[in-house]
């Protein structure tokens, strides 16, 4: 009885709006938690292996072959850079396909590139169209690449001038076709990529490049491929299964994440191996032996 009376006295002594204030506080906490959960990207083995590399100052090399295309990795990284919970921007340099191709693919993944372009979050440079015009004007491959880098640098500077733009990602699809476009001059391509890498240090942006590793299988010293792997902070290799074709497994991924800092201050590399299966709207990643 005494306990009940004391509890009643305490309740009466509370301000009339106490319950309302407490309710509002709980509501704010609830919405704050929901906002944090909304901003967190869904994680998979590929995202985990990248180790938060969506941050700036890193180069990611995606290396595939004829048997196993790495286009799905580029699509994944592109969608990740343009996720709806950020205001980051992308400069996309395409030697492979027009914008309509990527737009169709990304729409299936829940990302509308046309809308992103209209919102100034995507600058798409279609080299399939630009190159034809420039060559008709008598420009050399070196002139085109110099002008192209200037355009990329200008776009990065403009994007960085916006307060809401936290990060810019430069995507190149793909390096082997760029080499063809440069009349086979790997030196020109390497110079261009080194300049693009300098943007990662100068502006803190990321660089993603797709290259076909088997193009250099008949070359004794594939200088371009080796130099790309040297420049990259992360190398993602997409290969067919060593055991041959499988119904539910389309290939394997090897992600080498370099220059990771440890407690001692030294850098080290971490290698992740897993397999994948491409679906209509997504890609499933899993460890070897986990699929029956």
Image (spheres, grey):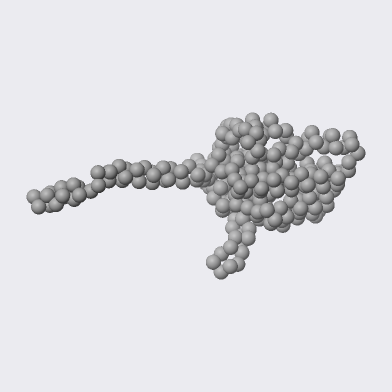
Residue 177 seen in this snapshot: yes
124 horizontally vs 282: left or right: right
Pick whichever, 235 or 139, lies toward us.
Answer: 139
28 horizontally vs 238: left or right: left
Residue 220: x, y in percent?
81, 53
Residue 237 seen in this snapshot: no
10 horizontally vs 172: left or right: left
- Which residue is most to the bottom? 264
User: What is the count of numbered marks?
Assistant: 0
Residue 196 position (above or below residue 248): below
74 horizontally vs 224: left or right: left
Pick whichever, 225 or 290, lies toward us.
Answer: 225
Residue 57: x, y in percent?
65, 54
Residue 221: x, y in percent?
80, 55
Instruction: Look at 8% across and 50% down and name the residue there.
Output: 1
- Which residue is most to the left? 1
Instruction: Look at 62% across and 33% down and name the residue there.
Output: 115
Residue 252: x, y in percent?
61, 45
Residue 255 position (above or below residue 84): below
- Quadrant housing residue 257: bottom right
Instruction: Look at 78% across and 47% down and name the residue there.
Output: 150
Pick whichever, 82 or 96, lies toward us.
Answer: 82
- Quadrant housing residue 279: top right
Residue 145 position (above or below residue 131): below
Instruction: Look at 58% across and 63% down and name the residue there.
Output: 261
């Amino acid at each position: 009885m005494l306990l009940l009376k004391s509890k009643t006295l305490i309740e009466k002594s509370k301000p009339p709006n106490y319950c309302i204030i407490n309710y509002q506080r709980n509501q704010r906490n609830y919405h704050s938690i929901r906002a944090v959960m909304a901003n967190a990207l869904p994680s998979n083995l590929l995202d985990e292996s990248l180790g938060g590399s969506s941050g700036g100052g890193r180069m990611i090399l995606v290396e595939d072959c004829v048997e196993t295309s790495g286009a799905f990795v580029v699509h994944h990284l592109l969608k990740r850079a343009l996720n709806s919970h950020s205001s980051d921007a992308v400069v996309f340099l395409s030697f492979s396909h027009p914008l309509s191709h990527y737009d169709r693919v990304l729409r299936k993944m829940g990302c509308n590139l046309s809308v992103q372009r209209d919102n100034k979050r995507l600058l798409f440079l279609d080299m399939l169209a630009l190159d034809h015009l420039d060559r008709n004007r008598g420009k050399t491959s070196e002139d085109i690449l110099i002008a192209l880098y200037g355009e990329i640098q200008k776009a990065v500077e403009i994007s960085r001038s916006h307060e809401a733009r936290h990060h810019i990602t430069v995507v190149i699809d793909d390096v082997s076709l760029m080499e063809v476009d440069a009349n086979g001059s790997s030196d020109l391509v390497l110079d261009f990529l080194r300049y693009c890498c300098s943007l990662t240090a100068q502006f803190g942006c990321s660089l993603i490049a797709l290259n076909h590793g088997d193009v250099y299988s008949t070359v004794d010293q594939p200088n371009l491929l080796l130099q790309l792997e040297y420049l990259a902070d992360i190398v993602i290799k997409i290969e067919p299964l060593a055991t041959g074709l499988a119904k539910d497994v389309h290939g394997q991924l090897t992600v080498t994440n370099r220059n990771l800092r440890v407690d001692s201050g030294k850098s080290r590399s971490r290698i992740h191996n897993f397999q994948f299966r491409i679906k209509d709207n997504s890609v499933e990643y899993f460890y070897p032996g986990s699929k029956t």
